[in-house]
Amino acid sequence: MKRLGILTGGGDAPGLNAVIRATVKTAIKEYGCEVFGIRNGYDGFLEMEGIVPLGMQEVRGILPRGGTILGSANRGNPYARKVIRDGKEITVDVSEEIVKGIKRLELDALIVLGGDGTLHIAHELAEKGVPIIGVPKTIDNDISGTEVTFGFDTALNIAMEALDRLHTTAESHHRAMVLELMGRDAGFIALQAGISGGADVILIPEIPFKFESVMAKVHERAEKGSKFSILAVSEGAKPVNGGQIFSRKGDEIYVPRLGGIGQVVGEYIEKQGFESRVTVLGHLQRGGTPTAFDRSLATRFGAAAVRLAAQGGFDRMVALKCSRITDISLVEATATLKRVKLDDDAVVTARNVGISFGDE
Ligand code: F6P
């Protein structure tokens, strides 16, 4: 193994730079490899100056930095790339150009850091013969086959801190404070942050809720003397017999953008005569320095991806299982999104301590 490429695709997540650093260090120290960074996801293969050599100097000091030094693109699908032809916007399949770009660079392996979309593309490229290895990244923690993705722990801690801060205002002003959290179709952030931040109600996409049940919990608490409530609401949560709320429709380039359910829940509570305020935590969950857990996991994933490449373990993804680093096929990793299971210990525990999911 002489030449490695690395790219970061999809939304950024805390720990991307830690993976890049570990990959470069391991590749150079253990295998004497040259490493090339591909800028802006797969797009870098098509861009002028899209490829940058990465040495020890380039990765110095990046361990605690959020974002990605390589840049990312969450509309960089080579199978549906947006281009302007004859003044018209169309989508074209440029995957063959990506394959050629990889061959031109004479890469022995391409390490791809990404979530569901980026890893799907990685598998399709692997089927065209590209020696590819995936590293699971997303704050949503929705990738199958790994207990946890890097970025999740940091997002969780930010969400928990936000809940702690909302608590004081909720109590002082006798209000219901609603916090809308990220996670798309998986409720891991709202669930775990809700438990660790002392939420009274947690609404997640996996458990459709009833407005009346949410309100019943707020009233029950008020009657018992706690005239305030904290609600952790996943952006993908939906009422029974209702759909998810989107702030923007999707198209062939962009996935639909979720957002607004927190406001809907807050307005319902106000209409029932209980003062409420809504906070949308948004991209604050994705930014900034990674936690110790994410730095360590990201470093372990980066080094493991290089070891896997050296063994020729292509079309696979590094993963965490029973606290050990392992690897699984990309097909298996991307077959279904990981979501909160209704009999998950965290769900049972939340119910045990009196948290409502709005379903009873
Ligand atoms: O998948 C990660 C994520 O942060 C989701 O939780 C969220 O719905 C989405 O990305 C937001 O994407 P964007 O940065 O494109 O707004």
Image (spheres, helix red, strand yellow):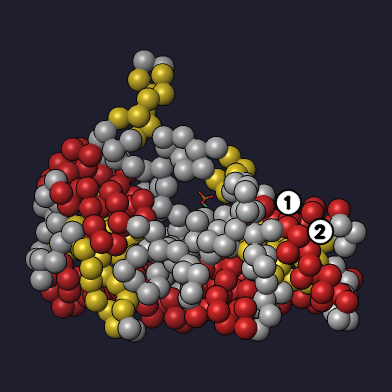
Q: What is the crowding at mark 2: few (fewer than 14 residues within 10 Å), some, or many (at least 20)?
A: many
User: Residue pushed farthest front?
Assistant: 360
Q: Answer whether labels 2 and 1 touch (C-beta < 8 Å).
A: no
Residue at image location 36% in from the left, 15% down from the top: 86
Residue at image location 41% in from the left, 19% down from the top: 88
Mark 2 sits on what residue? 269
Q: Position of residue 40 (x, y in %)?
A: 36, 49
Q: Position of residue 8 (x, y in %)?
A: 35, 57
Q: Is residue 79 left or right of residue 155?
A: left
Q: Is residue 97 left or right of residue 89?
A: left
Mark 1 sits on what residue? 264
Three-letter residue code for mark 2: Ile
Q: Where is residue 29 in the image (x, y as percent from the top left)?
A: 18, 77
Q: Where is residue 107 in the image (x, y as percent from the top left)?
A: 14, 55
- Secondary element under disc 2, as helix, strand or loop, is helix
**Callout 1: CB less than 8 Å from ligand 1:** no
